[in-house]
Image (cartoon, rainbow, N blue to C red):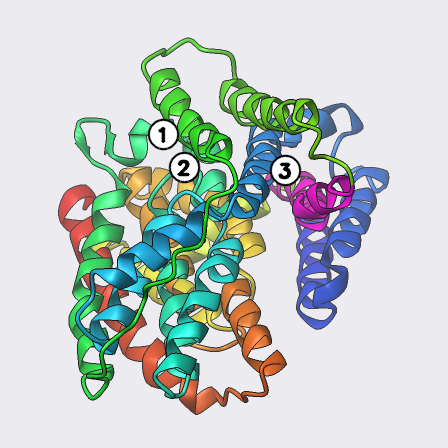
Amino acid sequence: MDRMIWALALFIVMYVLLLVFSQKRWIIALCAAFVFVVSGLMPLGGVLKAVNWNVLMMLTGTMVLVELFIQSKMPLRMAEGILRATPNVCWAIVALSLFSGIISAFVDNVATVLMVAPVGLAVAKKIKTNPVPVFIAIAVSSNLQGAATLVGDTTSILLGGHLGMSFNDFIWFRGRPGIIFSVELGALLTIPVLLWLFRREKAAVDSEHLTPVSDYAPTWLMLGVIALLIAASQFKNKPELTNGYICCGLALIGIVYELLRGRMKGRWLSLAEAIDWKTLLLLTGLFIVISGLTEAGVIDAVAGLFVKIGGGSAFWMYVLIVAVSVALSAFIDNIPYVATMLPVVGSIASLMNADPCLYAFGLLIGATLGGNITPIGASANIAGIGILQKEGYQVSTRDFTRIGIPFTLIAAFSGAALNWLIWG
């Protein structure tokens, strides 16, 4: 019991520090991992096994490929092409929002906002309208679909690693529709919300200019990642690090290609900066801490508490997990939350004799969408607001919640409901 109490106390201290000192999260997580090891709560021999290297390799490779993809100007060209097909500003905003959602299913949410937001700003300036709601619509849409695929977001990669899911498993898993169907239903049902919010924006959109694409090779590499991950899904006994090898391997091909073309001069720094080293180190520390919590019996104890609160009902337990995830993710980063809760919901499923996919998918749906409620709930929101502030625009919490709350409620309720019908 003393071992469990000490482990839980250390974890609580770590999480409070993560919330208070958000810029130092990676340092805090690594220090907490060190304390777990030196105190004996986490055996030294199990440290390397505790770290999910496949997840870290996938993230690293994807980050490099996304940077090359952005530098090629292809995403900007795609967004401008979409604008050409829209009749007015209302539909242009809806189209840009859906486009950012589709892109974010394969590209990091923050990177998606950085790609699509300048187009939204240009549209707003051209018709002399307030760009704030346009940016918010783009940000919340990019947050939504990050959970749709294996490479869409850090949290979806964590889910895939925890359940041993391949790229195809997000589409069809164990003989049932995967989580992508729940996410996409939520995305489709947000279209009426956006149409209502921007119903007065009827001005025409002029999009004659199309940004030239500097190189199509990064686009082919991005498509190659998806194709190879799908192909790898067909092999049941593949090496544990297969997905990581694919992402890192194609990223290396992209760098070699740029070197052969003589275009890497002065770009090494941008590629190095594209790799979010702090997130990788944060996850490394969290993997070790969570493994230590499991060793100490904390995960099973917390799962037992949830089961007691849920009253033994699989349905109310599901509602509790989704609701808590939405509420907490509105204010805290969903990466450490999902990393911590995945083992917990797995243990809950075991105690209640339920399918672990039900609670794990519900956790991801709630944690992904909860960030859309407030301006600080997701990194993509903060990135979009930062761009607006540089342009001289201020974003109030009221401005954000006017779009974020109805968007979140519709998407979360519909996605969670379909997930229950499939896996409940």
Total marks drawn? Answer: 3
Which residue is tagged 3?
Answer: 291
Is 47 left or right of 105, judged from the image as shown?
A: right
**Sequence-wise, which precedes: disc 2 or disc 3?**
2
When the figure is inspected, residue 80 is found, relative to residue 332, above or below; the finding is above
Image x and y of residue 123, in percent: 37, 74
Instruction: Give the amino acid at mark 2.
Output: Leu
Of 179 and 63, nearer the camera is: 63
Give the residues in magenta.
266-294
Of 391 and 383, nearer the camera is: 391
Residue 193 location, quadrant? bottom left
In percent of the image, x 19 and y 61: which residue is there? 414
| Overall secondary structure of the magenta section | helix
Report the disc number at residue 167: 1
Is 396 left or right of 185, judged from the image as shown?
A: right
Q: Is residue 164 visible?
A: no
Label 2 to label 3: alpha-carbon separation = 23 Å
Q: Are marks 1 and 2 in contact (CB under 8 Å)?
A: yes
Instruction: Give the amino acid at mark 1.
Output: Phe
Q: Nearer the viewer, mark 3 or mark 1?
A: 1
Q: Residue furthest right?
A: 38
Which residue is tagged 2?
Answer: 150
In percent of the image, x 17 and y 64: which residue is there? 189
Q: Secondary structure at mark 3?
A: helix
**Sequence-wise, which precedes: disc 1 or disc 2?**
2
- Characterize the local packing of mark 1: few (<14), some (14-19) or many (20 or more) Cα atoms within 10 angstroms: many
Residue 285 inside the magenta-drawn segment = yes
